[in-house]
Image (cartoon, helix red, strand yellow):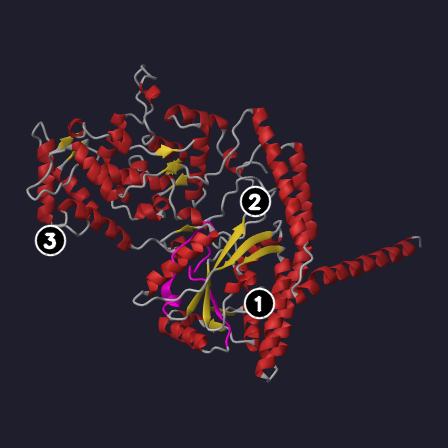
Amino acid sequence: MDWFPLDNLLCMLLGISFTVWFTLLLVFIIVPAIFGVSFGIRRLYMKTLLKIFEWATLRMERGAREKNHQLYKPYSNGIIAKEPTSLEEEIQEVRRSASPRELDANGTPEFDISDILCFCRRGVESIVDDEVTKRFSAEELETWNLLTRSSAHFQHLSLRLTLLWGLGVLVRYGVLLPLRVTLAFTGVGLLVVLTTIVGFLPNRRLKNILSDKVHLMCYRICVRALTAIITYHDRANKPRNGGICVANHTSPIDVIILASDGCYAMVGQVHGGLMGIIQKAMVKACPHIWFERSEVKDRHLVAKRLSDHVKDRGKLPILIFPEGTCINNTSVMMFKKGSFEIGATVYPVAIKYDPRFGDAFWNSSKYGMVTYLLRMMSSWAIVCSVWYLPPMQRQEGEDAVHFANRVKAAIAQQGGLVDLLWDGGLKREKVKDVFKEEQQKLYSRTLVGTHKDRSRS
Amino acid sequence: MGSRASTLLREEEIEEIKKETGFSHSQITRLYSRFTSLDKGENGTLSREDFQRIPELAINPLGDRIINAFFPEGEDQVNFRGFMRTLAHFRPIEDNEKNKDPSGTEPLNSRTNKLLFAFRLYDLDRDDKISRDELLQVLRMMVGVNISDEQLGSIADRTIQEADQNGDNSISFNEFIKVLEKVDVEQKMSIRFLH
């Protein structure tokens, strides 16, 4: 009998807190998302976090000094220092020092048994530290950011730090995660529903305007669902209709980040399940380019659809990630030349994430999509910078590969990323034999030189 | 919570590796980090496939021979100790080390041991001699299809002729050392490890 009034009180309290919760959500998050304004709450949050991280680092350094240990420093400068000379130059150097008079009749130095030393050292250097394999796993942090997932190398955790970490876990999983998941569902749900509704409109112009607004609004809600704090630079260079926007790829979130600031036509494979539903809804409101699995292999078909889309000035710019796979945001790997052959204006975009607040890289061999999204939503925040670079066009007589490399270099330079020629596909596949054959050819040239009659025998 | 990487590598092990190889504490933890990142199977050992996954090594013409050098005779897995022992050959020779150990056990990164490493790359059947056949095979690995058999044969013959001193038409380790006496092996076979 005594419990009833208490029960009622509890229900009332729950009801009130729910209402308050949702009102706050609406006022502070959803309404600004609709209108594209920001209260600056996220930036304040970011500054507070930074101060906490600094404090944590100081405590760890103190702890390390007390125990007289060295604090682990990640190998951001490399484990080893490599020689900048090429293999050929090195071999000539060693031959000259080994036997200075060792020249054959034509004046070209021949094989020396010491040649093996150079291959040997380079091979072992690549075992200790190579440029490629480290791009496919999460970047190591300089200082700890109070997340368990990045704590592998950090020791000297005092009681206070552990408490802080515990508090962090509570905040992230108890408060932030439910909030973000709610927002994510709201955002995606609204996207599906509203784009379907817009799809019913007959009028072309009204349809386009509404479609743009709907897409932007839903993406902005998704941005808030990730607590993404994005700084856009050089907005004047934003991609225009009839162009192709290319960017470096770190995670599926890249799409949300770019699409919350501008409207793009997406390119991708048709998926099943939830993704498929979203794709079908989106394409009702405005023309995106979705390929069936079988069509993806057909290069000509892909190129034709892309160039048809680009020629229609009424259609939105295409968003493509030429690397073809997710890289860990420390480098830019080979751009596939497909999008650069079409002849449209290319708008390069560089995206650089700040790893201190949460690692955005999707290691698809380690985590599935759902696990990845949960990890994203339980990090502190996703902080990144987006640079819109000036548009580029293919020059006279320039081939697609050269153009692609030019664009890649511009993106790498702006984002502060390492520009690599290696293919991102090496994440899963073995390197092609043709590269080894190139190395063998290079070495053979040092044996027989450039004497044409020799090499033709 | 705490340092996951180092808890798998105990302090005593680090000390033992330090004594055996001469690497510093921080170098050993860094290299352990590298070892675990290569170990896709997460079983504490590396197989040949783990090495071949490194693109820069896979395109090295002598990649397979170098990988082989890490594995002891007849074995297919190498643990961290073995990994470090092989890498220790490539530590630079510091001056104070030359005078350090008069008791006789040569450090792994001495000039002789570096040369032995290189010798073993040529010596395919591990019989302590480089025969003409072995030299030809290694040469073939290095040049691919770009040089004819006859040319390669004559290169091999010339090389053996110059190095062979006891007339057995093959190169022994001592003859190998003699041929390379003017080469700065310490520098060419050393990797500058940071910290």
Is label 3 or label 2 in front? 3
Q: Which residue is mark 2?
A: A149
Horizontal and vertical percent position of residue A378 = 62, 51
Q: Are marks 3 and 1 in contact (CB under 8 Å)?
A: no
Residue A299: quadrant of the picture:
bottom left
Q: Which residue is mark 1?
A: A274
Q: Earlier in the sequence, mark 3 or mark 1?
A: 1
Q: Secondary structure at mark 1?
A: helix
Name the amino acid type tagged 3.
Answer: Lys
Q: Which residue is mark 3?
A: A452
Asked whether, in this view, residue A360 is left or right of residue A186, the answer is left
Give the chain letter at badge 2: A
Write the residue at 31% across / 48% down.
B58
Horizontal and vertical percent position of residue A195 = 61, 74
What's drawn in magenta, residue-wise?
Answer: A315-341
Write the residue at 73% across / 63% down.
A26
Rendered position, B10 above or below A107 = above
Write the residue at 10% across / 31% down.
B164
